[in-house]
Image (cartoon, rainbow, N blue to C red):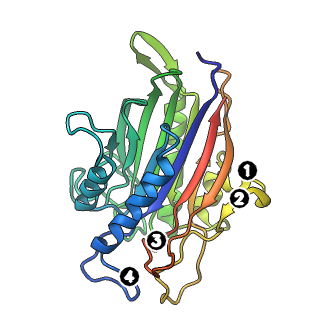
Amino acid sequence: MMTQILPIRILTHNIRYATTTPFKGERPWVERKQLLLNEFQYETRHCPETFVCLQEVLHNQLGEILAGLNEKAKPETPEWEYIGVGRDDGHESGEYSPIFYRAAVWELIHWETVWLSSTPETPSKSWDAASIRIVTIGVFTHRQTQDTILVMNTHLDDQGSRSRLEAARIILKKISDYRARTYEHHGVTRAISGTFLAGDFNSEENQEAYQELTVSLLDAYKEVPSSQRYGNDITWTGFGYENEPASRIDYVLVDPTVKQSRRLAVQGYAALGNKFDDGVYCSDHRAVVVDLLLR
Protein backbone atom coordinates (compact mmCIF):
# COMPACT_ATOMS: atom_id res chain seq x y z
CA MET A 1 0.00 0.00 0.00
CA MET A 2 2.73 2.47 0.97
CA THR A 3 4.55 2.05 -2.34
CA GLN A 4 1.58 3.29 -4.36
CA ILE A 5 2.12 6.55 -6.25
CA LEU A 6 -0.31 9.18 -5.00
CA PRO A 7 -1.22 12.17 -7.24
CA ILE A 8 -2.17 15.37 -5.41
CA ARG A 9 -3.40 18.61 -6.98
CA ILE A 10 -3.15 21.98 -5.21
CA LEU A 11 -5.23 24.97 -6.25
CA THR A 12 -4.46 28.21 -4.40
CA HIS A 13 -6.34 31.43 -5.12
CA ASN A 14 -6.77 34.78 -3.39
CA ILE A 15 -10.40 35.34 -4.34
CA ARG A 16 -10.66 39.00 -3.16
CA TYR A 17 -12.96 39.59 -0.23
CA ALA A 18 -16.57 40.61 -0.85
CA THR A 19 -16.14 44.34 -0.45
CA THR A 20 -19.15 46.66 -0.30
CA THR A 21 -17.13 49.36 -2.09
CA PRO A 22 -15.65 47.71 -5.20
CA PHE A 23 -12.46 49.13 -6.65
CA LYS A 24 -12.51 50.64 -10.12
CA GLY A 25 -12.73 47.75 -12.58
CA GLU A 26 -13.91 45.34 -9.86
CA ARG A 27 -17.29 43.65 -10.12
CA PRO A 28 -19.18 42.83 -6.90
CA TRP A 29 -18.94 39.38 -5.37
CA VAL A 30 -22.36 38.34 -6.65
CA GLU A 31 -21.04 38.71 -10.22
CA ARG A 32 -17.67 37.06 -9.55
CA LYS A 33 -18.83 34.12 -7.47
CA GLN A 34 -19.93 31.77 -10.24
CA LEU A 35 -16.76 32.42 -12.25
CA LEU A 36 -14.69 31.20 -9.33
CA LEU A 37 -16.94 28.24 -8.62
CA ASN A 38 -16.64 27.18 -12.25
CA GLU A 39 -12.86 27.34 -11.90
CA PHE A 40 -12.83 25.24 -8.73
CA GLN A 41 -15.19 22.62 -10.13
CA TYR A 42 -13.34 22.30 -13.43
CA GLU A 43 -9.86 22.15 -11.94
CA THR A 44 -10.78 19.59 -9.28
CA ARG A 45 -13.04 17.32 -11.35
CA HIS A 46 -10.50 14.71 -12.39
CA CYS A 47 -8.27 14.58 -9.31
CA PRO A 48 -10.18 13.52 -6.20
CA GLU A 49 -7.08 14.26 -4.09
CA THR A 50 -7.25 18.01 -4.82
CA PHE A 51 -6.89 20.56 -2.02
CA VAL A 52 -8.35 24.03 -2.63
CA CYS A 53 -6.54 26.71 -0.60
CA LEU A 54 -8.18 30.15 -0.68
CA GLN A 55 -7.37 33.53 0.80
CA GLU A 56 -9.42 36.65 1.65
CA VAL A 57 -12.56 34.60 2.20
CA LEU A 58 -15.27 36.23 4.33
CA HIS A 59 -17.79 34.07 6.15
CA ASN A 60 -20.60 34.62 3.65
CA GLN A 61 -18.24 33.77 0.78
CA LEU A 62 -17.14 30.62 2.58
CA GLY A 63 -20.72 29.41 2.88
CA GLU A 64 -21.52 30.15 -0.76
CA ILE A 65 -18.37 28.43 -2.03
CA LEU A 66 -19.02 25.34 0.10
CA ALA A 67 -22.63 25.22 -1.09
CA GLY A 68 -21.49 25.58 -4.71
CA LEU A 69 -18.92 22.80 -4.41
CA ASN A 70 -21.55 20.55 -2.83
CA GLU A 71 -24.35 21.50 -5.20
CA LYS A 72 -24.72 17.95 -6.60
CA ALA A 73 -24.12 16.12 -3.32
CA LYS A 74 -26.75 15.01 -0.83
CA PRO A 75 -26.99 17.35 2.19
CA GLU A 76 -26.33 14.48 4.60
CA THR A 77 -23.18 13.41 2.72
CA PRO A 78 -21.42 16.52 1.36
CA GLU A 79 -18.57 15.92 -1.07
CA TRP A 80 -16.46 18.81 0.19
CA GLU A 81 -15.56 19.97 3.69
CA TYR A 82 -13.16 22.63 4.94
CA ILE A 83 -10.96 23.69 7.84
CA GLY A 84 -10.36 27.28 8.89
CA VAL A 85 -11.61 30.20 10.99
CA GLY A 86 -12.03 33.94 10.62
CA ARG A 87 -8.76 35.60 11.52
CA ASP A 88 -10.22 38.46 13.59
CA ASP A 89 -11.81 36.40 16.38
CA GLY A 90 -10.96 32.76 15.66
CA HIS A 91 -14.57 32.07 14.72
CA GLU A 92 -16.46 33.81 11.91
CA SER A 93 -15.14 37.39 11.90
CA GLY A 94 -12.62 38.58 9.34
CA GLU A 95 -10.94 36.80 6.47
CA TYR A 96 -10.46 33.03 6.41
CA SER A 97 -7.61 31.13 4.76
CA PRO A 98 -9.59 27.90 4.40
CA ILE A 99 -8.51 24.53 3.06
CA PHE A 100 -11.22 22.59 1.18
CA TYR A 101 -10.91 18.83 0.73
CA ARG A 102 -12.99 15.76 -0.14
CA ALA A 103 -13.76 13.90 3.08
CA ALA A 104 -14.28 10.60 1.26
CA VAL A 105 -10.67 10.82 0.01
CA TRP A 106 -8.83 12.44 2.92
CA GLU A 107 -9.39 11.78 6.61
CA LEU A 108 -8.70 14.83 8.75
CA ILE A 109 -6.41 13.84 11.62
CA HIS A 110 -5.71 17.24 13.18
CA TRP A 111 -6.02 20.92 12.34
CA GLU A 112 -5.36 24.31 13.86
CA THR A 113 -5.12 28.01 13.05
CA VAL A 114 -1.95 29.81 14.08
CA TRP A 115 -1.78 33.60 14.28
CA LEU A 116 1.36 34.99 12.70
CA SER A 117 2.29 37.17 15.63
CA SER A 118 4.22 37.09 18.89
CA THR A 119 1.10 35.50 20.47
CA PRO A 120 0.26 32.78 17.93
CA GLU A 121 -2.43 31.08 20.03
CA THR A 122 -4.82 34.05 20.01
CA PRO A 123 -6.15 36.51 17.40
CA SER A 124 -3.45 39.18 17.23
CA LYS A 125 -0.96 41.06 15.11
CA SER A 126 2.61 42.10 15.86
CA TRP A 127 5.62 43.96 14.53
CA ASP A 128 4.68 46.17 11.56
CA ALA A 129 1.67 44.17 10.34
CA ALA A 130 -1.24 46.22 9.06
CA SER A 131 -3.72 43.34 9.53
CA ILE A 132 -4.14 40.19 11.57
CA ARG A 133 -2.60 37.28 9.68
CA ILE A 134 -2.94 33.51 10.03
CA VAL A 135 -1.83 30.15 8.71
CA THR A 136 -4.32 27.26 8.54
CA ILE A 137 -2.72 23.87 9.17
CA GLY A 138 -4.15 20.41 8.54
CA VAL A 139 -2.85 16.87 8.86
CA PHE A 140 -4.64 14.50 6.49
CA THR A 141 -4.40 10.76 5.86
CA HIS A 142 -5.27 9.43 2.42
CA ARG A 143 -7.92 6.79 2.97
CA GLN A 144 -6.66 4.43 0.26
CA THR A 145 -2.86 4.60 0.56
CA GLN A 146 -2.74 5.62 4.26
CA ASP A 147 -0.16 8.31 3.44
CA THR A 148 -0.26 11.23 5.87
CA ILE A 149 0.50 14.74 4.65
CA LEU A 150 0.81 18.21 6.16
CA VAL A 151 -1.16 20.96 4.38
CA MET A 152 -0.70 24.68 5.12
CA ASN A 153 -2.43 27.75 3.69
CA THR A 154 -1.54 31.35 4.50
CA HIS A 155 -1.90 35.01 3.54
CA LEU A 156 0.96 37.21 4.68
CA ASP A 157 0.76 40.94 5.40
CA ASP A 158 0.76 43.37 2.49
CA GLN A 159 2.40 46.22 4.41
CA GLY A 160 4.83 44.95 7.03
CA SER A 161 8.20 43.67 5.85
CA ARG A 162 9.27 42.50 9.29
CA SER A 163 5.92 40.84 9.96
CA ARG A 164 6.28 38.80 6.75
CA LEU A 165 9.75 37.68 7.79
CA GLU A 166 8.64 36.73 11.29
CA ALA A 167 5.58 34.97 9.87
CA ALA A 168 7.82 32.90 7.60
CA ARG A 169 9.88 31.88 10.62
CA ILE A 170 6.76 30.84 12.56
CA ILE A 171 5.59 28.75 9.61
CA LEU A 172 8.96 27.01 9.23
CA LYS A 173 9.03 26.23 12.95
CA LYS A 174 5.53 24.74 12.67
CA ILE A 175 6.61 22.56 9.75
CA SER A 176 9.60 21.32 11.74
CA ASP A 177 7.44 20.58 14.79
CA TYR A 178 4.78 18.71 12.82
CA ARG A 179 7.29 16.64 10.88
CA ALA A 180 8.98 15.59 14.13
CA ARG A 181 5.72 14.10 15.46
CA THR A 182 3.96 10.82 14.80
CA TYR A 183 0.21 10.39 14.57
CA GLU A 184 -1.98 7.59 15.85
CA HIS A 185 -4.46 6.55 13.17
CA HIS A 186 -6.75 3.57 13.76
CA GLY A 187 -4.17 2.03 16.05
CA VAL A 188 -1.29 2.59 13.64
CA THR A 189 1.49 5.12 14.26
CA ARG A 190 2.28 7.21 11.19
CA ALA A 191 4.67 10.01 10.31
CA ILE A 192 4.09 12.81 7.82
CA SER A 193 5.36 11.76 4.40
CA GLY A 194 4.74 15.00 2.48
CA THR A 195 4.33 18.72 3.19
CA PHE A 196 3.24 21.73 1.18
CA LEU A 197 2.56 25.40 1.90
CA ALA A 198 0.24 27.41 -0.36
CA GLY A 199 -0.89 31.00 -0.30
CA ASP A 200 -0.50 34.68 -1.03
CA PHE A 201 2.84 35.68 0.47
CA ASN A 202 2.75 39.35 -0.61
CA SER A 203 6.44 38.77 -1.23
CA GLU A 204 8.34 38.60 -4.49
CA GLU A 205 11.36 36.37 -5.01
CA ASN A 206 13.84 38.97 -3.84
CA GLN A 207 11.90 39.80 -0.68
CA GLU A 208 12.02 38.59 2.90
CA ALA A 209 9.30 35.95 3.24
CA TYR A 210 10.11 34.17 -0.02
CA GLN A 211 13.84 34.23 0.72
CA GLU A 212 13.33 32.82 4.22
CA LEU A 213 10.89 30.10 3.21
CA THR A 214 12.83 28.85 0.21
CA VAL A 215 15.96 28.16 2.23
CA SER A 216 14.33 24.83 3.08
CA LEU A 217 11.24 24.62 0.83
CA LEU A 218 11.08 24.25 -2.95
CA ASP A 219 9.12 26.68 -5.12
CA ALA A 220 6.92 24.49 -7.34
CA TYR A 221 7.22 27.07 -10.13
CA LYS A 222 10.98 26.55 -10.30
CA GLU A 223 10.68 22.76 -10.18
CA VAL A 224 9.01 22.78 -13.61
CA PRO A 225 11.01 23.90 -16.68
CA SER A 226 9.68 27.13 -18.20
CA SER A 227 8.93 25.29 -21.43
CA GLN A 228 6.55 23.00 -19.54
CA ARG A 229 4.65 25.49 -17.39
CA TYR A 230 1.12 26.45 -18.42
CA GLY A 231 -0.31 29.94 -18.45
CA ASN A 232 1.13 33.01 -16.81
CA ASP A 233 4.08 33.86 -14.62
CA ILE A 234 2.36 36.84 -12.96
CA THR A 235 -0.17 35.97 -10.24
CA TRP A 236 -1.26 39.43 -9.00
CA THR A 237 -2.82 41.57 -11.71
CA GLY A 238 -5.10 44.02 -9.93
CA PHE A 239 -8.38 44.91 -11.62
CA GLY A 240 -6.72 46.84 -14.43
CA TYR A 241 -6.53 50.33 -12.95
CA GLU A 242 -4.01 50.04 -10.10
CA ASN A 243 -0.86 52.09 -10.44
CA GLU A 244 1.30 49.18 -9.27
CA PRO A 245 3.34 46.67 -11.25
CA ALA A 246 1.89 43.19 -11.59
CA SER A 247 3.93 40.55 -9.74
CA ARG A 248 4.30 36.90 -8.73
CA ILE A 249 3.34 36.71 -5.06
CA ASP A 250 1.18 33.55 -4.91
CA TYR A 251 3.00 30.27 -4.39
CA VAL A 252 2.98 26.59 -3.65
CA LEU A 253 6.10 25.52 -1.77
CA VAL A 254 7.00 21.89 -1.14
CA ASP A 255 9.17 20.27 1.51
CA PRO A 256 11.73 18.10 -0.36
CA THR A 257 12.58 15.95 2.66
CA VAL A 258 12.32 12.21 2.10
CA LYS A 259 10.25 10.70 4.91
CA GLN A 260 9.13 7.08 5.32
CA SER A 261 10.91 6.48 1.97
CA ARG A 262 8.38 8.85 0.37
CA ARG A 263 9.05 12.13 -1.45
CA LEU A 264 6.63 14.76 -2.74
CA ALA A 265 7.70 15.68 -6.28
CA VAL A 266 6.36 18.48 -8.50
CA GLN A 267 4.89 17.28 -11.80
CA GLY A 268 3.16 20.34 -13.21
CA TYR A 269 2.58 24.07 -12.70
CA ALA A 270 0.02 26.54 -14.04
CA ALA A 271 -1.11 30.09 -13.31
CA LEU A 272 -4.62 30.37 -14.69
CA GLY A 273 -6.30 33.31 -16.36
CA ASN A 274 -8.52 35.56 -14.25
CA LYS A 275 -10.25 37.41 -17.12
CA PHE A 276 -11.81 36.08 -20.31
CA ASP A 277 -13.97 37.32 -23.20
CA ASP A 278 -16.51 38.97 -20.93
CA GLY A 279 -13.81 41.24 -19.50
CA VAL A 280 -14.78 40.45 -15.90
CA TYR A 281 -11.96 39.77 -13.47
CA CYS A 282 -12.94 36.88 -11.18
CA SER A 283 -10.32 38.24 -8.74
CA ASP A 284 -7.32 40.55 -8.70
CA HIS A 285 -5.17 37.41 -8.38
CA ARG A 286 -4.73 34.44 -10.68
CA ALA A 287 -5.10 30.91 -9.38
CA VAL A 288 -1.98 28.78 -9.12
CA VAL A 289 -2.44 25.05 -9.78
CA VAL A 290 0.30 22.56 -8.96
CA ASP A 291 0.32 18.81 -9.55
CA LEU A 292 2.39 16.72 -7.15
CA LEU A 293 3.26 13.04 -6.88
CA LEU A 294 3.96 11.35 -3.59
CA ARG A 295 6.11 8.37 -4.42
Residue 223: image tag: 1
Type of amino acid under label 4 = Glu
Type of amino acid under label 3 = Asp
Q: Nearer the viewer, mark 3 or mark 4?
A: 4
The Cα atoms of the two marked residues, 4 and 1, are separated by 33 Å
The answer to which of 65 and 207 lies nearer the viewer is: 65
The Cα atoms of the two marked residues, 1 and 2, are separated by 10 Å
Judging by the rendered image, the residue that carries numbered circle 3 is 158
The quadrant of the picture occupied by the C terminus is: top right
User: Residue 30 in the image: x percent, y percent?
Assistant: 27, 71
Residue at 52%, 90% in the rendered image? 243
Judging by the rendered image, the residue that carries numbered circle 4 is 26
> Sequence order check: which comes first, mark 1 or mark 2?
1
Residue at 30%, 77% in the rendered image? 28
Residue 294 in sight in this render? yes
> Sequence order check: which comes first, mark 3 or mark 4?
4
User: Residue 222 in the image: x percent, y percent?
Assistant: 72, 55
Mark 1 crowdedness (10 Å alpha carbons): few <14, some 14-19, many ≥20: some
Badge 3 element:
loop
